[in-house]
């Protein structure tokens, strides 16, 4: 079961890649308010909170929903419907296969076209409504109904969504979030990962270092072309991992079949364990 906030962490599901400056996944893309994604985005549904910023095109196989003051430095292409909150800005063109619901003072520099209805109004922003309703369900103890609400965002695909928490900054140089980060299997990313906790799945390639911020308890790694470090937390290096850099932490636990092409520094203990894990039995 999820926590009270579906955007409580940076999640990159299995198979997420960055291709030609686009963040690509078969599922949905959910971006918290005041976040910066210096990529284009390709996914099923794309939903962003207020003042979210995108550095390239948005391409959605289904719907696009951008809340107020969102900014897109490119085109927006939605095969389904689109909602744009007031004062949203698109530097390129907007093409919508279905209906367009648009707020006041929206700026689309190169014009738009929609095959369905066009409605101009100022409803409650999508993400605000979603979070308000979800919080109310959880307060009433209606966890099953809250889970159904979460699942609706991915109703058209079995693929889990990309989630980028509020205030995060994502680019080719760095992936920064004041929250835990979960990177799935077979992902391919460039840039240093900075989060309060880091988990990396099997067969993923990270072309950069992983560093946990001081507020977390641990970090985990599978494959990294860079250092894996943590201050005050532990590092777990699992079977088959390849670390092309140094590993350092309070305690470092390494599977015997992991490969570390660098130094290991542990302020506490460095141990070999065939089942490295975060939680004790």
Image (cartoon, rainbow, N blue to C red):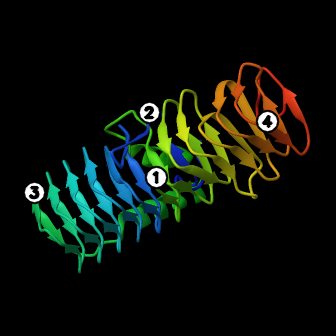
Residue 35 percent location from the top left of the image: 47, 64
| CA neighbours of label 1 inside 10 A, class few (<14), some (14 to 19), many (20+) | some
| CA neighbours of label 3 inside 10 A, class few (<14), some (14 to 19), many (20+) | few
Instruction: Locate residue 219 relative to residue 178 in the image: left or right.
Output: right
Q: Residue furthest right?
A: 268
Work out whether 188 lies above or below 2.
above
User: What label does residue 172 carry, if any?
Assistant: 1
- What residue sits 84% from the left and 33% below the top? 280
- What residue sits 35% from the left and 49% below the top? 21
Q: In front of the other: label 1 or label 3?
A: 1
Q: CA distance from mark 2 to mark 1?
A: 17 Å
Quadrant for the C terminus, please: top right
Could you say which is closer to the camera, residue 34 or residue 258?
A: 258
Q: CA distance from mark 1 to mark 4?
A: 32 Å
Q: What residue does disc 2 label?
A: 15
- What residue sits 70% from the left and 31% below the top? 261
> Tag 2 or tag 4, which sits nearer the N-term?
2
Q: What residue does disc 3 label?
A: 116
| CA neighbours of label 2 inside 10 A, class few (<14), some (14 to 19), many (20+) | some
> Tag 3 or tag 1, which sits nearer the N-term?
3
Local secondary structure at mark 2: loop
Instruction: Locate residue 106 relative to residue 39 in the image: left or right.
Output: left
Q: Residue furthest front?
A: 262
User: What label does residue 279 carry, if any?
Assistant: 4
């Amino acid at each position: 079961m999820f926590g009270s906030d579906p955007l409580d962490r940076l999640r990159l599901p299995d198979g997420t890649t960055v291709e030609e400056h686009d963040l690509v996944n078969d599922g949905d893309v959910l971006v918290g308010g005041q976040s910066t994604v210096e990529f284009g985005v390709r996914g099923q549904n794309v939903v962003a909170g207020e003042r979210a910023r995108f550095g390239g095109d948005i391409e959605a196989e289904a719907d696009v929903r951008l809340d107020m003051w969102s900014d897109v430095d490119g085109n927006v292409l939605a095969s389904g419907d689109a909602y744009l909150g007031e004062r949203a800005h698109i530097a390129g063109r907007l093409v919508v296969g279905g209906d367009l619901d648009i707020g006041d003072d929206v700026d689309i520099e190169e014009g738009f076209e929609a095959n369905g209805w066009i409605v101009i109004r100022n409803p409650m922003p999508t993400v605000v409504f979603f979070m308000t309703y979800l919080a109310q369900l959880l307060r009433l103890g209606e966890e099953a109904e809250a889970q159904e609400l979460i699942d609706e965002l991915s109703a058209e695909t079995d693929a889990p969504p990309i989630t980028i928490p509020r205030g995060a900054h994502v680019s080719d140089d760095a992936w920064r979030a004041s929250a835990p980060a979960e990177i799935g299997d077979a992902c391919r990313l460039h840039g240093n990962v900075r989060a309060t906790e880091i988990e990396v799945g099997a067969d993923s390639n990270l072309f950069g270092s992983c560093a946990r911020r001081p507020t977390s308890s641990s970090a985990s790694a599978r494959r990294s072309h860079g250092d894996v470090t943590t201050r005050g937390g532990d590092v777990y290096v699992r079977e088959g991992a390849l670390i092309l850099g140094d590993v350092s932490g309070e305690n470092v636990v390494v599977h015997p079949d992991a490969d570390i092409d660098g130094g290991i520094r542990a302020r506490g203990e460095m141990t070999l364990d065939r089942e490295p894990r975060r939680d004790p039995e």
